[in-house]
Amino acid sequence: MSAEEIYFYTVVWLAIGVAVVIAAAVLLITVLVLAHRIAKLAGIALEVVEDIEHNTKPIWQLNATNKVAGDLLAGATAIEANAGAILGALAEADEKNSVA
């Protein structure tokens, strides 16, 4: 192998090596840029999720509201029954007073 051939192959392989290094650098920079973009979009998505959680929290509290409404209904039913009993007792007393 002559000196010219060695020089030629050295230059060719050096050019191939430089091309590989440049391609790897381009890929690495692309990955870094995309990772930064993904992190930015993830931050935006997290804000949206927090907004959704804030807006749907009252829905999850409906169970407690329904329980309180049921308790109020039970109380109102008891008051209605007591009022009916009082009304019945007063009606009986009026009948006894009007007969006597």
Image (cartoon, rainbow, N blue to C red):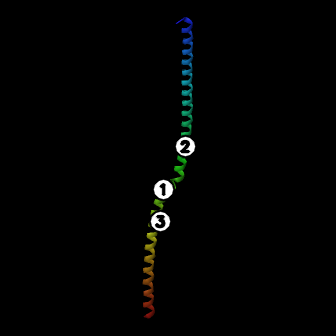
Q: In x, y percent, where is residue 8?
A: 57, 11
Viewer-side residue, 49 vs 2:
2
| Position of the C terminus by quadrant | bottom left
Q: In what element is the residue under mark 2? A: helix
Q: In x, y percent, where is residue 19?
A: 57, 20
Residue corresponding to mark 3? 69
Viewer-side residue, 20 vs 25:
20
Image height of 99 relative to 73, above or below: below
Q: Which circle's residue, 1 or 3, is located before the other in the chain?
A: 1
Residue corresponding to mark 2? 45
Question: Quadrant of residue 89 in the image?
Answer: bottom left
Q: Nearer the viewer, mark 1 or mark 3?
A: 1
Viewer-side residue, 1 vs 33:
1
- Label 1, label 3: how many angstroms apart (C-alpha)? 15 Å
At 56% across and 24% down in the image, what residue appears?
A: 23
Q: Residue furthest top?
A: 3
Q: In what element is the residue under mark 1? A: helix
Q: Which mark is residue 60?
A: 1
Residues under numbered marks 1 and 3 in contact, where contact means CB atoms less than 8 Å apart? no
Q: In what element is the residue under mark 3? A: helix
- Label 1, label 2: how many angstroms apart (C-alpha)? 22 Å
Dot 2 amino acid type: Ala
Q: Residues within 10 Å of mark 2 (few under 14, many from 20)?
A: few
Question: Quadrant of residue 13 in the image?
Answer: top right
Dot 3 amino acid type: Ala
Q: In x, y percent, where is residue 96?
A: 42, 90
